Image (cartoon, rainbow, N blue to C red):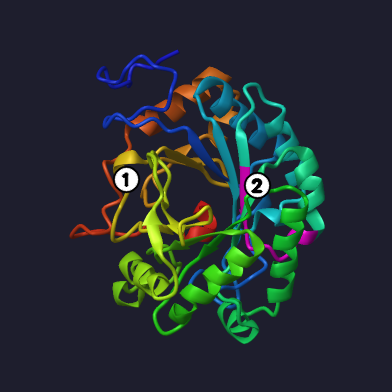
Amino acid sequence: MRGTAVDPARPDSPLLTDRFGRVATDLRVSLTDRCNLRCTYCMPAEGLDWLPKPEVLTDEELARLIGIAVTRLGVTDIRFTGGEPLLRPGLVDVVAATAALAPRPRISMTTNGVSLARHAPALAAAGLDRVNVSLDTLDPIRFRTLTRRDRLGDVFDGMAAARAAGLTPVKVNSVLMRGVNEDEAVPLLRFCLERGYQLRFIEQMPLDPQHGWDRGDMVTAAEILAALRSAFELTPEPGERGGAPAERWLVDGGPAVVGVIASVTRPFCAACDRTRLTADGQVRNCLFSRTETDLRALLRGGASDEEIAERWRGNAWAKAAGHGINEAGFHQPDRPMSAIGG
């Protein structure tokens, strides 16, 4: 069902299409804005003003929206994020409900890994396919300084438990920052190669709550690759990249790979296939979008599944050509990364 405000240029398609020919098939679902770490580049030591519980989607509301995305809008990949998604009490049930959908989507989760060892077996049994673990340093003292918590050993245990539970490939997300941990590119890759993890470096993006991001502090993709090439032979991985955010490189001829997500210096917006759902039920068609579409109000106002799907299609159609980080007049979104979800 379409309303009178639909752009007549929009194709009559059930999918999440936009004006530039892209189709969103990857849904990032933020389960909470809360976190049990206090990473210096993500939030202040005292934390942030968390979403009030009544504003957060219930497990049933989450399951319904994910179901609409998969069965009506053509979404094939679900990634659970946060905040820290393992803090969501009903996480296992939400994963199980997602895995029960037909067609079944691929299901992954991005986590800081602190409590992953405790939850990995249950999540695997519920239907989670794999995990990404955020890890910026291998040094316990540096980890404590960066995260304001002494939990590096727990993260290592969580990664090993995920691998043992079959949540593979275990991918590791690392952000290098100038003067902080830029010397760890090679050690991080060695660590991952020795354990069978897949490492992905991510350029630091302007998503901090303080709005203090400085391009000069960002270690660029070119710098990361130069550091890695001091110890390894890197060759581009054959095949099409598609909508994948990471450029992937074979390490010493393969089969091991390392990825670099150059969101700032080499944007991949033209092939973006992502849409995002925040923990309070707002749809965002870009990580850096400054506008949102409220699906929670529709849910709680008695809207039908098709009415919700149609509103979601409208949000996708309005997606901009790119995130605009490198353009004059760029303004980062009001919400920080922890409240948007990766």
Is label 2 in a helix, a strand or a loop? strand
In the rendered view, would you say 100 is above or below 182? above
Vertical order, 167 against 191 (above or below): above
Magenta span of residues = 108-117
- Residue 169 showing in the rendered view: yes
Where is residue 218? Give x, y as percent. 36, 72
Q: Residue at x 32, y 74 (%)?
A: 214
Q: In the drawing, does residue 30 fall left or right of residue 332?
A: right
- In the foreground, 195 or 112: 195
Q: Reply above or below: 80 against 191.
A: above
Instruction: Name which quarter of the figure residue 35 lies in.
Output: bottom right
Name the secondary structure under disc 1: helix
Up-down relation of residue 250 to residue 73 (above or below): below
The answer, for residue 40, to whether it is visible in the render is no
List the residue tagged with mark 2: 130
Percent coordinates x, y for residue 198 in the rendering: 56, 57
* Residue 105 on the magenta span: no
Q: Residue at x 41, y 59 (%)?
A: 260
Q: Residue 144: which quarter of the image? A: bottom right
341 lies left or right of 119? left
Task: Give the residue at x 53% y 52%.
Answer: 255
Kindly identify which numbered label has been placed on residue 24: none
What amino acid is labelled 2 in the image?
Arg
Q: Label 2 near label 1: C-beta < 8 Å?
A: no
Give 192 or 36, whichever is nearer the viewer: 192
Residue designated by label 1: 269
Which one is earlier in the sequence, the residue at label 1 or at label 2?
2
Q: Quadrant of residue 179?
A: bottom left
